[in-house]
Image (cartoon, grey):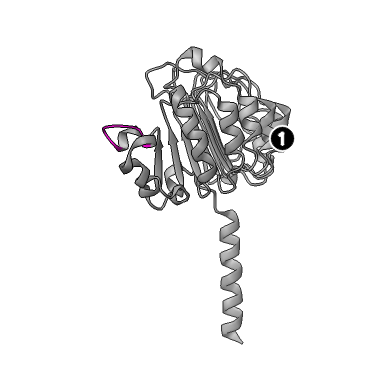
């Protein structure tokens, strides 16, 4: 009987600890068990002499596209798009995609990506784009095709507005939307009931100079029921809202690179959080 009670206590303690454990930020590579199953596209550099379309070496490498779990897209030319469209339906096991460019005819490409049932992580890196390329990307359409993913990064795209289609990503657990120009969060953000980790603001680690116009932690964010980890790196943030205390799951708060906030407000009790950090400095 004692051993039974001890076992039940241990089980209860383990469950409680699991419930209070803060989620960890997930990088794309964290979801990959083996880099051998990463596909770089275009893959002409797999063979120094040609593209995969007319090379036995490359054709052998791509004989079974269902083995790949990771896709990295960079510097896709117009002539590569047809090859990519042919490949996407066969990438049935892909879990993560990283875009260091968004190819032309991306409407067709994301229509195919929407069909990838196991896709859960998508990362867009815009700091390698020209400003003209950034202006021609419709993220409203792209987000509408990513409704099933759990992890999303949109970094350095100069987004002045977060498309309302973000609210369709109801399975989203983690969002990194740094180095963009938006100041407000759309009301549709409130639909992200499963969001656990949110990163907003400035990474400032690239050649381009990025800023953040976020001045307030809006009621939309304060109403997210499962948010556990909030990072805002914005020189223009004006206040730390007392509403953070009412967020039931919030355990980690980091506010950095700020020039207006000089002290923590009295309404914030740091004992509620596992981690509460405010760093002020000139940007």
Q: Give the total of numbered labels.
A: 1
Is 95 on the left-hand or right-hand side of 48?
right
Q: Residue, x 52% and y 37% (percent of image)?
A: 122
Which stretch appears magenta?
A: 47-52
Majority secondary structure in the magenta region: loop
Q: Nearer the viewer, residue 122 or 268?
A: 122
Q: Position of residue 5 (x, y in %)?
A: 61, 80
Q: Residue furthest left?
A: 48
Q: Residue, x 44% and y 51% (percent of image)?
A: 67
Q: Nearer the viewer, residue 201 or 206?
A: 206
Quarter of the image with the N terminus in it:
bottom right
Tell me: residue 34, above or below residue 80.
below
Q: Nearer the viewer, residue 10 or 224?
A: 224
Is 203 on the left-hand or right-hand side of 271?
left
Q: Position of residue 215 (x, y in %)?
A: 60, 20
Q: Residues within 10 Å of mark 1 (few under 14, many from 20)?
A: some
Tell me: residue 12, above or below residue 231.
below
Q: Residue, x 53% and y 20% (percent of image)?
A: 212
Tell me: residue 104, above or below residue 246.
above
Q: Is residue 271 magenta?
A: no
Q: Position of residue 84 (x, y in %)?
A: 48, 34
Q: Is residue 51 magenta?
A: yes
Tell me if I can see residue 117 in this picture. Answer: yes
Q: Residue, x 66% and y 32% (percent of image)?
A: 144
Secondary element at tag 1: helix
Q: Residue furthest bottom?
A: 1
Residue occupied by mark 1: 190
């Amino acid at each position: 009987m004692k051993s039974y009670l001890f076992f039940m206590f241990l089980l209860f303690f383990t469950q409680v600890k699991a419930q209070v454990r803060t989620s960890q930020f997930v990088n794309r590579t964290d979801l990959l068990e083996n880099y051998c199953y990463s596909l770089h596209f275009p893959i002409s550099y797999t063979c120094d002499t040609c593209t995969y379309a007319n090379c036995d070496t490359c054709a052998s490498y791509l004989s079974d596209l269902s083995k790949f779990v990771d896709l990295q897209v960079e510097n896709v030319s117009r002539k590569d798009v047809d090859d990519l469209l042919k490949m996407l339906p066969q990438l049935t096991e892909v879990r993560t995609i990283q875009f260091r460019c968004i190819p032309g005819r991306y409407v067709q490409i994301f229509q195919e990506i929407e069909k990838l049932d196991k896709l859960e992580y998508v990362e867009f890196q815009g700091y390698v784009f020209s400003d003209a390329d950034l202006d021609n990307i419709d993220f409203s359409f792209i987000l509408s095709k990513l409704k099933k993913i759990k992890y999303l990064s949109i970094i350095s795209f100069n987004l002045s507005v977060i498309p309302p289609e973000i609210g369709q990503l109801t399975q989203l657990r983690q969002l990194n939307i740094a180095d963009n120009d938006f100041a407000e969060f759309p009301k549709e953000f409130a639909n992200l009931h499963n969001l656990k980790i949110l990163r907003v603001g400035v990474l400032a680690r690239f050649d381009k100079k990025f800023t953040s116009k976020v001045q307030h932690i809006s009621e939309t964010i304060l109403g997210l029921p499962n948010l556990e980890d909030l990072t805002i790196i914005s020189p223009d943030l004006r206040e730390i809202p007392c509403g953070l205390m009412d967020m039931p799951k919030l355990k980690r708060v980091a506010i950095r690179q700020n020039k207006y906030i000089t002290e923590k407000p009295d309404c914030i009790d740091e004992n509620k959080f596992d981690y509460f950090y405010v760093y002020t400095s000139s940007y």
